Amino acid sequence: MFRRTALLAGFSLASALFSGAPPASAEPPAGRATPPEPAAARQVADPVLGALERFGRSIQRVTLENGLRVVLNPDSSSPTVAVAVTYGVGSRDERPGQSGFAHLFEHMMFQGSRNVKKGDHFTLIAERGGTLNGTTSSDRTNYFEVLPSSELPLALWLEADRMRSLDVTPENFENQRAVVQEEYRMRYENAPYMRGMLRLGELVFDGYAPYAHPTIGSMKELEAAKFEWVKDFYDRYYAPNNAVLAITGDFDTDQAMRLVREYFGAIPRKATARAELGAPPAQVSSRRETVEDPNVKTPGFFYGFRIPPSQTKEHYALELLTVMLADGESSRLHQLLVRDRALAQRVSAWTRDQVGPDELAISVVLTEKGKLADVQRVLDAELEKVRKAPPSPAELSKAKNRVRASFVFGIQTNMGRAVKLSEYESYYGDARQLARELGRYLEVTAEDVQRAAAQYLTPERRSLVEVVPVAKPAVAKAAAPKGQP
């Protein structure tokens, strides 16, 4: 989901973002193109939905003969261009004993290619005033750059060179293994409460291999990783027919497609196969575990519930519920646990937004006054209220407004749109679904929220991880000499 980060003061921003007329479609003589969807027959009263409808019509999709899917979204409002490449590989595709390998390989992609020396990908982008990064999730790995619009050829050439001929060497592999291990220590081993969050995901997806392990992997399996796996991973997943290239910003579509064909068109396709996402085993009883964490001073806990996949009606309803429960100081749990009773320092709630079965989690960090059992009873009572009664119209409207604001801001920039468009094309087979996403949240009713909570947020479906400080060893008192106190 688009994370709820700020409120939108008015909707002129959305109109400015998407008010331009749809550009002419690029004609792909070497591939096949899918035409934009026709405009909806009805007039959309909501200005944001109307702007998104125009945005959807501006999205162009082309597939090259080697299978590379290309998404184009011209926007001349700023003189920059963003390029995002999403590969259909994530931690769900890792083989047994190879957890964390998709993320490790993300780091390998910055270690040079046939025509780019190690470190030069960063240098070439930075010297031209651009930025870049890459991320890994359970469902995909992506890479993206933002540059002045005149530098589009450079961004495309760099991405094509490493798609075609990554510099896979034992030296680069060992170097990046050490980097990932240090990242694991910094973000998880030495960060408070993060061990508990990792364990929560393992409990929620226990028995379901695609999502049963964290994307970061484990230190033990990272240490056991072999160089031979790198070449195999590259050959299996890093291919044009397993990738989506999205270009957004100030560019000419015909020129962009000429460059895409020139740089990517001759890269051969490969035989790729993803892990299947079948139905997970049913959870018939609650799960509970305690994790000792040397980095915490007060206890905390996580609730986790397995919920339906993203883009289902129930998922939209439960996402809105996380906003009502814990997004901002006016949310239910903040009012109840932080402000009114001072039992918690902070509360949060989220969904992972996976393509397959997903997770809804609630996190509570206690104050010194709070007791685990007491706070859990308060939270259980609040969830029971949600299961028994729908939220008020005002509460639901406020949640939708926050989602609306976050959605619009999330695709305001060229980079934000490029990343999301490439993901939606990779996940769901049509990047234009991004333009229809907000409308699906706004269609959710209060009764939808109650029904989803009653079905999926039940005590027997709950996984609980308590995080407590490491117990201090008892110090034995020495016996006093006879006759002395």
Image (spheres, rainbow, N blue to C red):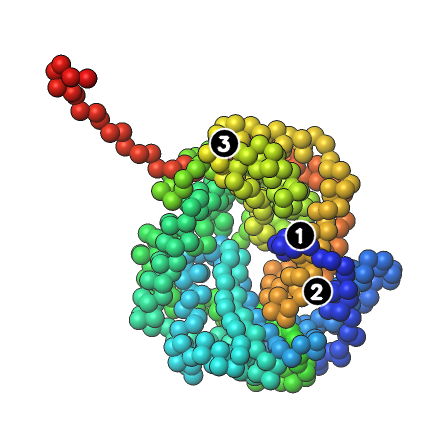
Type of the residue with mark 2 = Arg
Mark toward the start of the polypeptide (3 vs 1): 1
> Does residue 356 appear in this view?
no
> Does residue 133 appear in this view?
yes
Residue 287: horizontal and vertical position, in percent? 48, 33
Circle 2 residues within 10 Å: few <14, some 14–19, many ≥20 = many
Circle 3 residues within 10 Å: few <14, some 14–19, many ≥20 = some
Q: Calculate the distance from the C-alpha at mark 3 to the C-alpha at mark 2.
A: 47 Å
What SS does tag 1 mark? loop
Residue at point 67%, 61% (across, down)? 409
Mark toward the start of the polypeptide (3 vs 2): 3
Type of the residue with mark 3 = Gly
Residue 82: horizontal and vertical position, in percent? 60, 74
Q: Calculate the distance from the C-alpha at mark 1 to the C-alpha at mark 2.
A: 14 Å
Picture quadrant where residue 232 is located = bottom left
Q: Nearer the viewer, mark 3 or mark 2?
A: 3
Residue at point 77%, 74% (across, down)? 20
**Which residue does the numbered mark 1 point to in the structure image?**
311
Q: Calculate the distance from the C-alpha at mark 3 to the C-alpha at mark 1.
A: 37 Å
Q: Nearer the viewer, mark 3 or mark 1?
A: 3
Mark toward the start of the polypeptide (1 vs 2): 1
Circle 1 residues within 10 Å: few <14, some 14–19, many ≥20 = some
Give the number of marks.
3
**Up-down relation of residue 255 to residue 74 (above or below):** below
**Which residue does the numbered mark 2 point to in the structure image?**
432
**Which residue does the numbered mark 3 point to in the structure image?**
370
Residue at point 45%, 76% (across, down)? 122
Question: Would you say the residues marked 3 and 2 are in contact, meaning their CB atoms lie under 8 Å apart?
Answer: no
